[in-house]
Image (cartoon, rainbow, N blue to C red):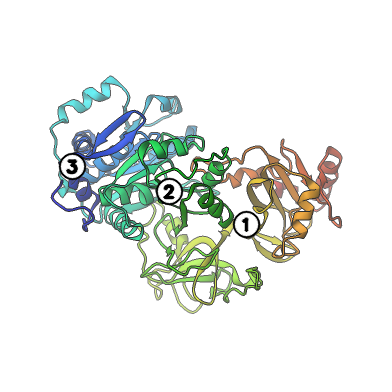
Amino acid sequence: MGSRSVGTGARTVAELVQDRWGDHRPGLWFEERTLTHHEVAAGAAARAALLADLLPPGAEPHVGVLLDNTPEYPLWLSAAALAGAAVAGINPTRRGPELARDILHTECRVLVTERAHLPLLDGLQLPGVRLLVTDTEAYEQLLAPYADARPEPTRAAPGSRLLLYFTSGSTGAPKAAICSQGRLAAAGRSLVGHFGVRADDVHYICMPMFHGNAVIADWAPALAAGAGVALRRRFSASGFLMDVRAYGATYFTYVGRAVQYILATPARADDRDNPLRTGFGTEAGAVDAAAFEERFGVRLVEGYGSSEGGAAIQRTPGTPKGAIGRAAPGDDLAVVDPASRTECPAAAFAADGRLLNGREAIGELVNRGPNPFEGYWRNEAAEAERRRWGSPRSSEAESGGGWYWTGDLFYRDTDGFLYFAGRTDDRLRVDSENLAAAVIENILARYEGADAVAVYAVPDPVAGDQVMATVAGSFDPLAFEAFLRAQPDLGTKMAPRFIRIVDRMPVTATNKIHRVGLRREGFRCADPVWWRPAGESGYRRLDEADLAELMERYRARGREELLVR
């Protein structure tokens, strides 16, 4: 084993990597390949030494990584830590000028990729960028002279940049959030304590490693505890349980709708025969979390952590059904009305758990205290928007640079437990009433035919919004109407005006619903759309005549251009 015992408080990720030197237990699995912890540390040391020689003098120590979840990804994360450098996770679903922009914006002078992704780079202008293609003989020859390198964590400090990971904003160019070695090491240690991660655990990483979820919530706690890591090149619902059993995985993370896709696979009598203890993630929903535990015997723990690190919520014993938890230690979280900058009133619930005052209680989650947000790379305007003014009576200077605004909607009960209600750009305004898309989604998810549900706004022909839902699964209009009438917490403005039916929900590369695309297409799409005309309670297919009449109403009010946004 290394110089430190497992689970002690290394201050940098580089120290955690060094700790695995001499640890000859199996530590990384990928397909048919297994590496020991020592081999991972040695491979990281070799790549760190290579990187030091490749970076031009005076260049920012940034290396772009355009890879699937292969062993090279954690090897380069570890190498960057040892070298005091930063990894910019490059999203392989980006194309053309947008992809080039991500690489150049983060000032990567070295780009690590694989042959499968080389077509993405064809024709791109990437001046001054050295390309390393991992699955080639040339790459192996380049690394060979550094085979005897040893980990040297002295180049890294807790404040050294380690990650530049792009946030998936709905508009504009993605922002590269900064995460330091100290913050990532602390996050890993925190999750080790929270979930009781042991050195003999195996963390299954099936979420893409260019995203913060996989690195911060899955890889970092495994590294901090000396646990093993099993990689899946890309998420596969059908391959999930097979991998878990093959690798002996005890922990995994999820985002978006991955849980729904796993639940949509055919059930088997032996589904509960698996080694998993815990799944940790966001937005699985109470219905799906209960179904997952019933089927697989695995508890899903819903958590919340702003991608940029500015706010966190921890689940504690006694957390009510539907709540995520309370503010993490050190955070001063409040649910705030952005217009007045005053705290929203506590949520009021009916006896059956319905939220009675969503219009007043739902607001944006804000951290009013000191927080570990470390900014965005070369984007002062975005930083200022994220951390802006505090109370109505305080200036930015008086509030210590402003509060941290998460961009997420929540409501809070009288005991301080927080409930997720969607994103700020998922708020709808119907007949002058503010609604949160996530609240409606949670209701519609109960519909028996729904494998997945997305709710979003489409413009009303006169003013405000109308509710539209996309349902993946089967749909019967009469059964759906009866379902809506039976839901006691479905407000009078919440029933969808339009329902799009798809075989599979469109998702982003991080398995989050592709809401931007759904909103942009609206009800003018190739998939079947059912709608409820004004004044009617039933749904019928939207045909060409209906669409022509609708479009005339939009044109008459000068609102047709709002249908593309």
Q: How many numbered discs?
A: 3
Vertical position of residue 314 compared to residue 276: above or below: below
Which labelled disc corresponds to residue 253? 2
User: Residue at horizontal 45%, vertical 24%?
Assistant: 119
Q: Position of residue 58 (x, y in %)?
A: 23, 42
Q: Of label 3 and label 2, which has the lower sequence position? A: 3
Would you name the residue on which mark 3 appears? 23
| Badge 3 element | loop
Binning the other alpha carbons within 10 Å of mark 1 as few (below 14), some (14 to 19) or many (20 upward) gives some
Residue 377 visible (yes or no): no
User: Hey, which residue is sitting farthest front in the picture?
Assistant: 269
Residue 471 picture location, percent across and down? 67, 45
Residue 232, located in which quarter of the rendered image?
top left
Q: Where residue 435 appears, x then y in whole percent?
A: 66, 62
Secondary structure beneath dot 1 equals: helix
Q: Which mark is residue 273?
A: none
- Residue 335 appears in the picture as rendered: yes
> What amino acid is found at the position of numbered circle 1 in the picture?
Asn
Q: Nearer the viewer, residue 211 or 2?
A: 2
Tag in front: 3 or 1: 3
**Residue 276 rendering spot, x and y as whole percentages:** 41, 47
Left or right placement of residue 531 versus residue 170 in this view: right
C-alpha separation, residue under disc 3 versus residue under disc 1:
46 Å
Is residue 65 rendered to the left or right of residue 489? left
